[in-house]
Image (tube, helix red, strand yellow):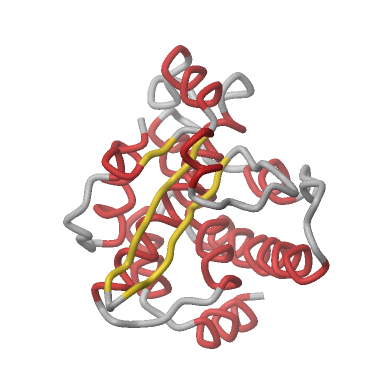
Amino acid sequence: MLVDVQRGLERLYRIETDLDVRDFVIDDKMRAKMGAPARRSPREELLFSEADGELHLALFVDDAALANLSANDPRERLDGRNLQDFLLAVEGVSHFVYVAWRARQVRPVTGLELELQAEIDKYATCALVLMGQGGGTGLVPRLFDEWTLAPGMDAEEAERYVVANTNARTYAASLEQRYVARGEVLGMLDELRWFYRLGATEKLAAIARAA
């Protein structure tokens, strides 16, 4: 499932990382060995570090989520049985792809930008899947209104998630109104590809204009 999400995101944005996410997936024991903070254990986490000009990546996604996606394939039907686990998978792979792609371009990425793009990737991916299944509208409240902060976050991290969610909700609502509700997929894809290549400040400015 994870590699299918990766390929989908890379096709969506017309980018290449030349990586296979499956080569970077770790389990909970390896995550602990790699020094992940013990104060909380999120169900999805991208670990990365840079040393001697090399980027080291590792992705953890909860085994139970992956098992559920295998049993209830969202490509066949995306619904309440698998939506939350699908969002979890998309978020993790989004982080992986974005960091890897930016590294190839020798461009930095901030934590806020990473979370903001992941939220938009979740909306775009779900919208496209559901449009293929005869739906697509009404996603914004389900994705952006029904959530809570994970326990154990510090104030800075919590603020980053709130800002990312708020801005992504604004942008997703604009995309839904301008494209999804009208069935104009190609127009949305063009805009998403343009948006993906913006820097953090430019993305926030674009969202403000779309509000």
Query: What residue lies at 54% left-to-right and 31% top-to-bottom?
Result: 62
Q: Quadrant of the N terminus?
A: top left
Q: Nearer the viewer, residue 136 or 118?
A: 118
| Percent of width and height locating residue 117 | 51, 64
Query: What residue lies at 32% left-to-right and 67% top-to-bottom?
Result: 55
Q: Which of 56 and 171 is in front in this view?
A: 56
Q: In which quarter of the image is the C terminus?
A: bottom right
Q: Hey, which residue is sitting farthest top in the picture?
A: 71
The number of discs equals 0
Q: Hey, which residue is sitting farthest front in the picture?
A: 33
| Percent of width and height locating residue 50 | 38, 71
Rendered view: 118 above or below 64? below
* Residue 153 left/right relative to 1: right
Query: What residue lies at 83% left-to-right and 68% top-to-bottom?
Result: 155
Rendered view: 70 above or below 14? above
Q: Nearer the viewer, residue 91 or 37?
A: 37
Query: What residue lies at 62% left-to-right and 43% top-to-bottom?
Result: 139
* Residue 83 left/right relative to 129: right
| Percent of width and height locating residue 37 | 65, 53
| Percent of width and height locating residue 151 | 82, 47
Rendered view: 128 above or below 185? above
